[in-house]
Amino acid sequence: MLSGSRFTTYLFASTALVVGVTYHTHSIRRQFYPTVIALTTNKVASLVLANAALALTLLVGRILKSAFFGRLREAEVEHLYERAWYAITETCLAMTIFREEFNISFCAMFCALLFIKSFHWLLQDRIAFLEQAPEVRLVTHLRVLGLTSALAALDAAFLYHALSSSIARGPSVLLLFAFEYLLLSSTIAATFVKYALYVNEARLGGRWDEKGVYLFYLDLATDLFHMLIYLGFFAQLAVLEPHPSAVPPGATSSSGAASSSGAATSSEGLGHQAGASSSADAAPATPTSAEGLRQMRLQRLSQPPPG
């Protein structure tokens, strides 16, 4: 994670690049609409704008982190890096199925998903830390409740958008994000239940022996639900992308042989037709009617006798 001074330098450098590219493009185009078109179509300008969007996202993330968590512990930062690496790898592997839809919209949705996932992970680690803390302030409880409510609302909103878009437009890359946000919705629900169990234990003075049993069944139910979600996702992928072995092995060769034999038959037929037409053209035209015979006789009579 970038330190405060390095992040400030990165933020100002990104802002300066955006201002410079925008000014240079506007000095050439001279109008607003052509400037926007040039910025969105030029590769270098698009890269600069994407970097600025990333810097802005990191800035918003730092502000929200300070508001809900304060200073992060080293263990929380380490867990954040590890989970982010696995999440990026898994999403990239799943994206190979929808590789035709890789565009700017997908990159934006992927960054938003990773951004929301990061706060889910931090919330889980913070609640696990609160269970071991000797004393927790009221402000910390308010932060946890506020962040839990915000994440639950975001998960529900993105899940509704992904499902409604998939139903309206058909299966697409939004199906992948729908399953991801469904997993996040179940995770935030389980996290809130764990927090409620912790609050109840704190109310009883830390003498609640049945808490471990409830946590065991909660983790078991969450894992089973996640397994069902993964099975449904893979079943949907099997319907959308059938396995190549479903095609009979000899179907391609037999179809190729049939097409070649059909082509040979058609070529032979065309050859016979061409031969018949050429022979018909080469043969002299013979009259077949009485009118034709009468005209031939008149032509012979009109010819002068040989000298």
Image (tube, helix red, strand yellow):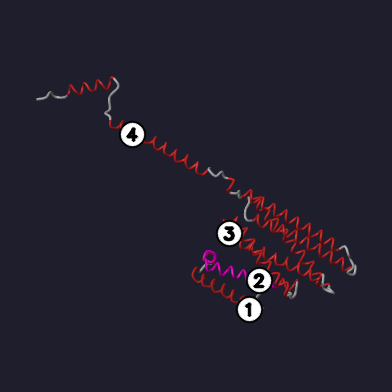
For marks 2 and 1, give the CA distance.
Answer: 13 Å
Task: Tell me, yes or no, whether the highlighted magenta stretch contains residue 55.
Answer: yes
Q: In the image, residue 10 lies at what x, y percent? A: 61, 76
Instruction: List the residue tagged with mark 4.
Output: 275
Residue found at x 48% / y 43%: 256
Query: Which badge, 3 or 4, is on the more N-terminal residue?
Result: 3
User: Taking 98 as reference, is 232 left or right?
Assistant: right
Task: Tell me, yes or no, whether the highlighted magenta stretch contains residue 183.
Answer: no
Majority secondary structure in the magenta region: helix
Q: Mark 3 against mark 4, which lies toward the viewer?
A: 4
Q: In the image, residue 87 lies at what x, y percent? A: 66, 63
User: Taking 230 as reference, is 16 left or right?
Assistant: left
What's the residue type where badge 3 is placed? Phe
Where residue 102 is drawn, which disc sits there? 3
Instruction: List the residue tagged with mark 2.
Output: 58
Residue found at x 70% / y 52%: 231
Between 79 and 152, the residue placed more toward the observer is 79
Query: Which badge, 3 or 1, is on the more N-terminal residue?
Result: 1
Q: Which residues are magenta?
A: 36-62
For marks 3 and 2, give the CA distance.
Answer: 23 Å
Instruction: List the residue tagged with mark 1.
Output: 6
